[in-house]
Image (cartoon, helix red, strand yellow):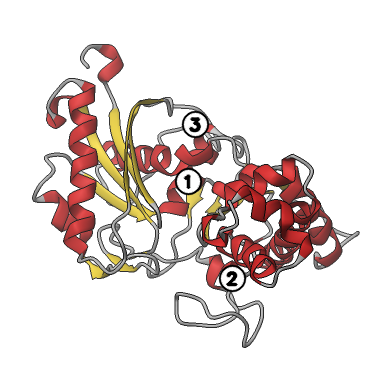
C-alpha cells in the first residue's frame, strides 16, 4: 500500500486470553487489514506467544503490500496483563505465562518498526475516546468484560496508568471476601462475578446439577456443558430463554455494583462497557444501570455518569494500540500524547 493513504499507518495487536488479533490501522481509526491467531496456552514459554505476535505482524505487512519501514510507522501491542510504566515490560499476565517479560525488547529484535506495549484495556479505552463512544468526554472509565475484567481510566483526555503503570485493574478488586478463587491468586475478585467466565460458570453449574432451568441451554450444546460459551448464552437470551436472561441480569447486577464503587473513586462522566460480554447489550446494561443507581454514593444529589456500550467492538484494543503507538512516535516520547485539539477530537 503506497501513496497518501499509507501515511501514518500503524499496526495494532491485541493479545487476549483466547486470541491474538491484529490490524493495520489508519489515522482515522479505520482497520484496513486484519489477521488473527489463537493465543498459545498459558503453560507455553513466552517465546511461543512472541512467535505468534511476529506471525500476525508479518501477515499484516504482507497484506499491506510493503516492507514495515515503508508502510507501517509504529506497532502497538495491547497485552492482557500488568504493563510497567516503561510501556515495554509485561509484569504479570494472569492468562499468559509472562512474568516480568521484556516484551518490547524481545519483539524489537524481530520487528523493524518502533514498538510500544500497553495494557489491552488502556488501548481499548483510548480507541473509544478517540473514535468511539466516549468522544467529547474528558473523564471516562472503561470496563471490558471478556474472559476476565479489564479496565482503564482517561482523565482530562490522558490515559492514567498510575505510578507503576498498572492502574485500572478493576477486575481484581475484591468484592466478596473469601469468595471464588481467581486466577490472580486472590479470592472474591470482581471478575469472578461479572465476566464471561462467571457467566459460563453459573450456567454450567445449573447444567451439572440437572436443573430443569438449564434444559434449553443443554440442548443448545448437545448435552455437553463443556461446549457452553458466553456468546451461546447471549444468543439464547436474545431468543427468549428465561434462564439465560436471568444469568445475564445477575452479571449485570455485579457489574453495576462495581461501577458504583468506581464512580465513588473516580467520578467520571461516562462508563464505556466493552469486551465480548458487552454484546448482550441492554440485557446486561439495563440491570447494571439499575444497580448502579441504587448503590451510587450520594444518589439523588449528584450527577450520574452515563453507562453505555462500546462502539468499536472487538477491534477497539487493536485500534487503540495502533493509535497510541502512532501518537508516541509522533511525539518522540515514551508516553503517547494526543495529537488532537481537545477531548475526543478526530485525527
Note whether 309 is above or below 153 in the view shown: above
Q: Nearer the viewer, mark 3 or mark 1?
A: 1
Mark before the other along the chain sequence, 1 or 2? 1
What is the quadrant of residue 84 in the picture?
bottom left
Q: Name which residue lies at 82% across and 67% down.
A: 295
Query: In this rendering, would 346 be left or right of 306?
Result: left
**Viewer-side residue, 159 vs 188:** 188
Please state the horizontal and vertical placement of residue 193, each as a whole percent of the image: 64, 68
Label number found at residue 124 = 1
Q: Nearer the viewer, mark 1 or mark 2?
A: 2
Q: Measure the alpha-carbon separation of dots 3 and 1.
A: 21 Å
Q: Name which residue lies at 77% across and 56% down.
A: 243
SS at mark 1?
helix
Please state the horizontal and vertical placement of residue 96, each as a whole percent of the image: 33, 65
Q: Measure the alpha-carbon separation of dots 2 and 3.
A: 40 Å
Disc 1: CA contacts within 10 A as few (<14), some (14-19) or many (>=20) = many
Please give the residue where the numbered disc 3 appears in the rendered image: 341
Q: Name which residue lies at 58% across and 51% down.
A: 222
Note whether 63 is above or below 139 in the view shown: above
SS at mark 3?
loop
Do the residues bearing badges 2 and 3 touch, measured as CB atoms within 8 Å?
A: no
**Viewer-side residue, 38 vs 139:** 38
**Viewer-side residue, 2 vs 203:** 203
Mark before the other along the chain sequence, 2 or 3? 2
Please give the residue where the numbered disc 2 appears in the rendered image: 192
Please state the horizontal and vertical placement of residue 202, each as a whole percent of the image: 66, 67
Please state the horizontal and vertical placement of residue 301, each as a whole percent of the image: 89, 60
SS at mark 2?
helix
Q: Quadrant of the N terminus?
A: top left
Amino acid at each position: 500500500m503506497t501513496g497518501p493513504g499509507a501515511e501514518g499507518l500503524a499496526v495494532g495487536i491485541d493479545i487476549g486470553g483466547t486470541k491474538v488479533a491484529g490490524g493495520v490501522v489508519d489515522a482515522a481509526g479505520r482497520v484496513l487489514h486484519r489477521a488473527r491467531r489463537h493465543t498459545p496456552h498459558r503453560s507455553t514459554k513466552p517465546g511461543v506467544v512472541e512467535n505468534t505476535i511476529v506471525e500476525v505482524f508479518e501477515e499484516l505487512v504482507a497484506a499491506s503490500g510493503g516492507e514495515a519501514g515503508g508502510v507501517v510507522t509504529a506497532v502497538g501491542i495491547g497485552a492482557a496483563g500488568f504493563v510497567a510504566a516503561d510501556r515495554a515490560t509485561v509484569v504479570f499476565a494472569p492468562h499468559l505465562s509472562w512474568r516480568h517479560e521484556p516484551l518490547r525488547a524481545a519483539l524489537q529484535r524481530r520487528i523493524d518498526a518502533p514498538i510500544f506495549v500497553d495494557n489491552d484495556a488502556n488501548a481499548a479505552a483510548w480507541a473509544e475516546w478517540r473514535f468511539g463512544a466516549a468522544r467529547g468526554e474528558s473523564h471516562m472509565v472503561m470496563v471490558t468484560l471478556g474472559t476476565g475484567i479489564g479496565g482503564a481510566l482517561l482523565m482530562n483526555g490522558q490515559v492514567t496508568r498510575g505510578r507503576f503503570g498498572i492502574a485500572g485493574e478493576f477486575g481484581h478488586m475484591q468484592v466478596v471476601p473469601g469468595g471464588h478463587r481467581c486466577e490472580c491468586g486472590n479470592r472474591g475478585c470482581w471478575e469472578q462475578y461479572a465476566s464471561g467466565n462467571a457467566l459460563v460458570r453459573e450456567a454450567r453449574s445449573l447444567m451439572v446439577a440437572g436443573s430443569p432451568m438449564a434444559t434449553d441451554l443443554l440442548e443448545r450444546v448437545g448435552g455437553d456443558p463443556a461446549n457452553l460459551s458466553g456468546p451461546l448464552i447471549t444468543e439464547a437470551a436474545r431468543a427468549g430463554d428465561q434462564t439465560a436472561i436471568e444469568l445475564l441480569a445477575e452479571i449485570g447486577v455485579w457489574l453495576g455494583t462495581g461501577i458504583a464503587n468506581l464512580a465513588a473513586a473516580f467520578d467520571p462522566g461516562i462508563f464505556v462497557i466493552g469486551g465480548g460480554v458487552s454484546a448482550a447489550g441492554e440485557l446486561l446494561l439495563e440491570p447494571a444501570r439499575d444497580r448502579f443507581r441504587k448503590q451510587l454514593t450520594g444518589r439523588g444529589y449528584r450527577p450520574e455518569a452515563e453507562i453505555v456500550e462500546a462502539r468499536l467492538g472487538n477491534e477497539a484494543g487493536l485500534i487503540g494500540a495502533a493509535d497510541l503507538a502512532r501518537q508516541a512516535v509522533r511525539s518522540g516520547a515514551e508516553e503517547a500524547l494526543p495529537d488532537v485539539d481537545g477531548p475526543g477530537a478526530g485525527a
